[in-house]
Structures are given as C-alpha cells and as structure tokens.
Image (tube, helix red, strand yellow):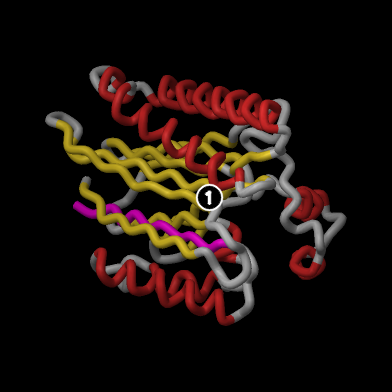
Amino acid sequence: MNFVGTAVTDIGIVKKTNQDSVCIKTANTEKLGQIAMVVLCDGMGGLEKGELASAVAIRAFLDWFDNELPKLLTRLNWRTFSTEWEKLIKEQNYRISQYGKTVDVTLGTTVTAMLVIGGKYLIAHVGDSRVYQLTDKIIQLTEDQTFIAREIKKGTMTAEQAAKDPRRNMLLQCVGASRNVEPQMLTGVIKEDTVFMFCSDGFRHVLSDEEMYESFNPTNATNAITMEQNSRYLIDVVKSRKERDNITVALLKCTK
C-alpha cells in the first residue's frame, strides 16, 4: 500500500498564534512496503503555551517513529503498538503537566494519531480533534471527549442544543492538563482508495459532513495538489463563516 498525504494549517481570523501542530511521516520498508503515521494536536494554554504543548507531543511521536518503530517491525504485533502509544501519551501527559507546574501555567493538547502498516491501522485519540474515513461515504472514527458529546450520548442534550452551547469546547481530558488520560484506541483494516481526514475542531465546527465529503472523497482527492487545493478552499470557507479558532486539516489517501 502507498500513501499520498497533505496537511494545511491556518492561524484563523482571531488568534495571535497557531496552537495546532500536525505531521505526516512515511517510510519505505523491505518487507511491509510503505508505512505511514499522521499526528494532529490542538494545543491550549495561557501565555501561548498551547503551541508548545502540541509541538512537544508531535515531537514525541516523530521520535518514536524514527527510533522505536524500526525495532518493532520484525515482529508485527498490533497489541504492542497500542501499548507503546498509550504509554507514550501518558508520558507526555506527565511531562507537559510537570512543565506547566514549573512555569505556573495550565497547558495541554489534544492528540489524534494514526499508524498505518500493511493495510491495517491503529488510532490513538485524546480530546476533540477528529479522524474521518471517506470511502463511498464519510464516517467519523473517533469520539469527541467533550462535555457536550457526553451529554448527547446520555440523551440530556440534542445536537442542535450542543451547537449553540457555550461549553462545546470543554474537554473531558487533555494531554498535559488532566491528572490521568485514557486514550481511545482503535484498530481497523484499510481498503484501497480510502481517504482519512484528520482535523482540529476549528476546521469542522462550521462545515457539514456533506461539504467535507464533496472535497475529500476518493474520487475528488486525486493527488497531493488537488488535496491541498481542496483543503485550502474549505479553510477559506471556514474563515468566511467567522470561525474563531485555529484551523487544521490533514489528509492521507491510501492507494495500491
């Protein structure tokens, strides 16, 4: 399996810094073909420290990909990958939290990461950034770990009420700002010509699933140039609708 990936991030129309961080990493292996990793983090914190929190988390995953993953590829064990990533996220939670205590600032970041090897994927997720899978339809794979998502699931709030609720950005857990974090861990099998879309909440707040699917479905996401152009188009749409947050979207198309 081969991959085409693009990532676009924008500071938006209000904030003075971009606290989102994103990376796409691929590597060629002799036995397993091309492998890929995507990580998207949406930072939060005073004194511009959210930018630091998200960057620290991204760097931890990149270091793992370069230094630890090669040791694990000789014995392809997805349970081991899942354990490693859960441990990595908890280590970063402690590391960022301890730094925040030294500078007396609360800071943290969402973490949404995917590893793709040999037609299978692993997702580790904390917060309210999202992963969508686009084939002949669009499906949200991750669950928002927010107050309003919990209330909708419990049946105490409707989606219409949630869209206008001032607590829509209240996270239930956040790497660096929570005493303990329990990542959502997902695994699955990938079909050819699947597109995975990763986004911070600033990207999808004012967009419909239909709009995202129209731009990023496998037929329209033909190559890296088109994927990036469509990403920038939707980011401009988001800004025109007065979204106040940073805006980030990353795409990974899986091909033969």
Task: Name the amino acid, label 1.
Answer: Leu
Q: Write the start and end of the magenta stretch as one range.
A: 246-256
* Badge 1 density bin: few <14, some 14–19, many ≥20, Cα 10 Å: some
Residue 135, how many percent across, how many down?
39, 61
Examine the residues drawn in magenta and state their main secondary structure: strand
Residue 210, how many percent across, how many down?
52, 74
Q: Viewer-proximal residue, 242 or 15?
A: 15
Residue 128, how many percent across, how many down?
62, 50
- Work out which residue is located at the far left of the displayed protein and give it: 30
Relative height, residue 10 to residue 58 (above, below)? below
Question: Is-magenta flag for residue 66?
Answer: no
SS at circle 1: loop
Q: Residue at x 30, y 36 (%)?
A: 117
Q: Quadrant of residue 14?
A: bottom right
Asked whether, in this view, residue 224 is left or right of residue 212, the answer is: left
Q: Residue at x 15, y 29 (%)?
A: 31
Instruction: Name the quadrant of the N terminus.
Output: top left
Q: Residue at x 48, y 41 (%)?
A: 55
- Work out which residue is located at the far right of the displayed protein and give it: 156
- Work out which residue is located at the far bottom of the displayed protein and give it: 240
Q: Viewer-proximal residue, 119 or 177?
A: 177
Q: Viewer-proximal residue, 195 or 42?
A: 42
- The residue to which callout 1 is attached is 141
Residue 9, how many percent across, how many down?
45, 61
Total marks shown come to 1
Q: Residue at x 60, y 59 (%)?
A: 201
Asked whether, in this view, residue 46 is left or right of residue 34, the answer is: right
Q: Viewer-proximal residue, 83 or 175?
A: 175
Asked whether, in this view, residue 18 is left or right of residue 205, the answer is: left
Asked whether, in this view, residue 68 is left or right of residue 240, the answer is: left
